[in-house]
Image (spheres, helix red, strand yellow):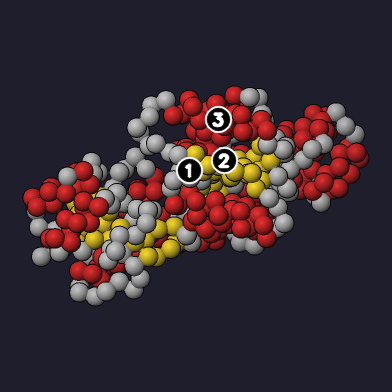
Amino acid sequence: MRPQILLIFDLQYEDCVLMLKGIANYERSHGPWASFLDDEMKAETDARWLANKRWDGIISRHTTPALVSRCTEMKIPLVDLNDVPAYPGVPKIRPDNVTVGHLGAEHLIERGFTNLAFCGFKADGWSCERRDGFIEAAKLAGQKVELLDVNYPGDVDPFWDEQQLQELTTWLRHLPKPVGVMACNDLRAQQVINAAHQVNLLVPEEIAVLGANNDLMRCELVYPNLSSVATNSTRSGYLAAETLDRLMKGYSPESYDVRIDPLEVVARQSTDLFAIKDRTMAAALAFIRENACKGISVEQVVQHSAASRSLLEKKFRESLGLSPHAVIRKMQVTKIKQLLYETDYPLKKIADLTGFEHVEYMCVLFKRAVGKSPGEYRKRHQAQTRN
């Protein structure tokens, strides 16, 4: 008889969907299991619900003390994917949040930001770990970090978003500019961008904003599109299934608290700029950011910035160590990476969307910049998220 597996996941969150994908990947090669998805979290709110059926194992993204207690009483193996402190005796798999913070700081520092800030939730351990990793990486680079940590009430306070808008606008106004801000997750980063718009601060020209978790809907529905540290939720789900399989076979887990490295920073428009104070440079870079994937020429950049070509070339090389042409190509390559990572579009469509008339030229340029062909790059990322 197939093992009866209960999966407790809220599908409104993208990380839950990716975790389930990882579980399915494991089950396909090691099952079969008979899995039931509790996407209403009935077992979370009423652990007595578990008594309605015999379960051989449970994987939960929404683990509560009541669920842990009930599983212990009924001797049901449980694996926890919730990013909160571990329950004794319950194996937990979660992101390496310190490394998430490190990646965020390094991404902003690489873009030339000497003013850094972090915005998070002070009562949530995962947010504090990301904050601490961000501060640690900044210190290693000899930089200080401005902080704004608040309590997150969840769904309890319907007026919290409006209150946060006011607090964030005050904080953002007083930050030294240009500044690179990392938020603890994509929800918080979205709030930062909305607050910046409220007080007419340019993103990313004055405030570059970076989120975490790479929730595609949040990242794509905000303008400019949000850069984010991609956690490896598919890998978390795969390891959770592997751990549950061990428990059901009577073995102990290899570890009771597994930390999963993030994948990478997925760069989008909200950080797609270097920290620049010169107004001519800022205007030229803003024009490139908006139009790089439309196949623009350096001459068009010169016309928009109202500076001579020789002066603009000099400013670019002094500030960035790159020519205007190289910056255009760099932004095109960043967009190609994003489309390879997030979509299954054929290369011809990606070439059209990034300003290349000939797909062959796009592939040559991409390999020269990244060291891999577009196909190799896509396969590598698909393999990372699959396992």
* In this rendering, position of residue 320 left or right of residue 36: right
Which label was assigned to residue 167? 3
Q: Helix, strand, or loop for circle 2? A: strand
User: Where the C terminus falls, by quadrant?
Assistant: bottom left
Q: Position of residue 41 (x, y in %)?
A: 23, 44
Q: Position of residue 180 (x, y in %)?
A: 65, 43
The three-letter code of the residue at mark 2 reads Leu
What's the CA distance linking mark 3 and mark 2?
Answer: 9 Å
Question: Mark 2 and mark 3 in contact (Cβ < 8 Å)?
Answer: yes
Name the N-terminal-most of marks 3 and 2. Answer: 2
Question: Mark 1 and mark 3 in contact (Cβ < 8 Å)?
Answer: no
Q: Which residue bears the numbered disc 1?
A: 121
The three-letter code of the residue at mark 1 reads Phe
The three-letter code of the residue at mark 3 reads Glu
Q: Position of residue 237 (x, y in %)?
A: 34, 58
Question: Which residue appears at 56% of the width and 56% of the height?
Answer: 133
Q: Helix, strand, or loop for circle 3? A: helix
Question: Which residue appears at 64% of the width and 40% of the height?
Answer: 208
Question: Which residue appears at 29% of the width and 64% of the height?
Answer: 88
Question: Which residue appears at 81% of the width and 51% of the height?
Answer: 321
